[in-house]
Amino acid sequence: MILMHLLLLACIAGFAQSKSFYDFKVKTLEGKDFDFSTLKGKKVMVVNTASKCGNTPQYSDLEDLYEKYGDLLVIIGFPANNFGQQEPGSATEIRTFCSEKYGVTFPLMQKISVKGDDMHPVYKWLTSKKENGVMDSEVEWNFQKYLINEDGKLFDVIAPKVKPNSDKILAWITSK
């Protein structure tokens, strides 16, 4: 009985120490602090983006979702140059491209690495069941979507080719 209580306490302590989505703080494309704890109570879609990819037109769909469902959903773009060197630009070049070509107004963060030895801590959390408590995944390509529920829990991973306005994503956004 004592052993069971000790095991339970160890599990609770381990769970309490695990990092939540809301524990992360990152920098915007312009270098300002962005605290994920400000997103509590909202659904969040985290997307690794690139300006020179076959999936780049998804910026338009992401912006449409953000405009239509901004009261329910926050979209966070993380430019990344991990796949085919398809995001070579500087922060200024990325902002200009996204604004002028696609009218992007949803938050864009500083360019990061989404895989490999230099993977950003947010993506370590998103891709590791050990960290997120839900599932393991691997970032397959640009525009992979990670869905975070209102409680800050990883809900699902959506493949890069799946459009942001797919029935599956729309059903998740509008579900209670």
Image: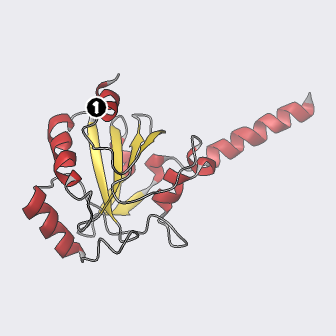
Q: Residue at x 27, y 70 (%)?
A: 31
Q: Does residue 44 lie above or below 57 as drawn?
A: above
The residue that disc 1 covers is 170
Residue 171 drawn at (x, y percent) = 32, 27
* SS of the residue under disc 1: helix
Q: Residue at x 84, y 32 (%)?
A: 5
Q: Quadrant of residue 9?
A: top right
Q: How is the image coloured?
A: secondary structure
Q: Does residue 29 lie above or below 126 as drawn?
A: below
Q: Does residue 17 lie above or below 52 as drawn?
A: above
Q: Quadrant of the N terminus?
A: top right
- Viewed as shown, does residue 9 lie left or right of 117? right
Q: Residue at x 29, y 56 (%)?
A: 77
Q: Quadrant of residue 64?
A: top left
Residue 141 drawn at (x, y percent) = 40, 59
Please tell me how many numbered marks the rendered image carries: 1
| 105 or 25, nearer to the observer | 105
Residue 158 drawn at (x, y percent) = 40, 44
Q: Quadrant of residue 113?
A: bottom left
Residue type at mark 1 is Leu
